[in-house]
Image: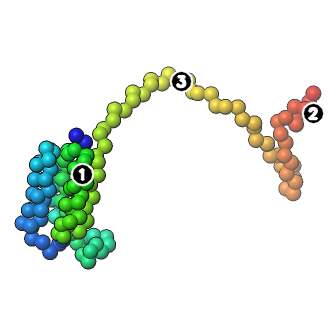
């Protein structure tokens, strides 16, 4: 089963017992549907950066769990229907991927740069005049 993380904010005027009861209800939902709770945290009251449903604060909780993908919609619907929850988010936690092994570099050998035309060389003859001299022009005059 995939791993998910749910973070939700409850109304700040709720008592800590009500918030614990709400968190326990979410935990029961997960366990009844053959899920597994990995982490359950209560972050406490935090100030919001903007007003949400008339509140500037929220009591935050976080639960990391594994559950069948089809039941996430039901969990989010429970969050939406509960008037004590002012904001929620459920995201899937990506599994850690194996990093490919790096190839050993050969010391002292640099990769060759692709050929580029050399920029023109600027030479000053007088303060007022600037003459542009290209390497190709000097090679033609010498031959």
Q: Secondary structure at mark 1?
A: helix
Whole-number angstrom distance, CA of label 1 to CA of label 3: 55 Å
Residue 105 visible in this rendered orientation of the protein: yes
Circle 2 residues within 10 Å: few <14, some 14–19, many ≥20: few
Q: Nearer the viewer, residue 143 or 116?
A: 116
Residue 59 visible in this rendered orientation of the protein: no
Query: What residue would you read off at disc 1?
Result: 72
Labelled disc at residue 141: 2
User: Is 76 on the left or on the right of 139, as rendered?
Assistant: left
Q: Position of residue 54 (x, y in %)?
A: 26, 77
Q: Against 29, is 19 above or below?
A: below
Whole-number angstrom distance, CA of label 3 to CA of label 2: 39 Å
Q: Are marks 1 and 2 in contact (CB under 8 Å)?
A: no
Q: If you read the primary sequence from the N terminus, does the residue marked by circle 1 or circle 2 appear first?
A: 1
Q: Against 123, is 41 above or below?
A: below
Q: Nearer the viewer, residue 104 or 107?
A: 104
Whole-number angstrom distance, CA of label 1 to CA of label 2: 79 Å
Circle 3 residues within 10 Å: few <14, some 14–19, many ≥20: few
In the rendered image, which quarter is residue 48 located in? bottom left
Q: If you read the primary sequence from the N terminus, does the residue marked by circle 1 or circle 3 appear first?
A: 1
Residue at the spot 48% in from the left edge and 24% down from the top edge: 105
Circle 1 residues within 10 Å: few <14, some 14–19, many ≥20: some
Figure quadrant of the N terminus: top left
Figure quadrant of the C terminus: top right
User: Is 42 on the left or on the right of 138, as rendered?
Assistant: left
Residue at the spot 75% in from the left edge and 36% down from the top edge: 117
Residue at the spot 16% in from the left edge and 64% down from the top edge: 44
Labelled disc at residue 108: 3
Q: Position of residue 131 (x, y in %)?
A: 86, 48
In this rendering, the label closer to the viewer, 1 or 3:
1
């Amino acid at each position: 089963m995939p791993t998910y993380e749910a973070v939700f904010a409850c109304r700040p005027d709720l008592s800590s017992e009500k918030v614990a009861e709400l968190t326990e209800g979410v935990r029961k939902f997960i366990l009844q549907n053959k899920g597994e709770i990995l982490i359950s945290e209560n972050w406490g009251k935090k100030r919001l950066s903007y007003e949400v449903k008339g509140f500037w604060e929220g009591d935050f909780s976080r639960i990391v769990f594994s559950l069948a993908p089809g039941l996430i919609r039901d969990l989010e619907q429970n969050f939406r229907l509960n008037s004590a929850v002012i904001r929620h988010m459920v995201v899937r936690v990506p599994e850690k991927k194996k990093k490919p092994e790096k190839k050993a570099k050969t010391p002292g050998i640099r990769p060759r740069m692709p050929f580029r035309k050399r920029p023109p060389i600027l030479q000053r003859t007088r303060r007022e005049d600037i003459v542009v001299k290209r390497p190709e022009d000097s090679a033609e005059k010498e031959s």
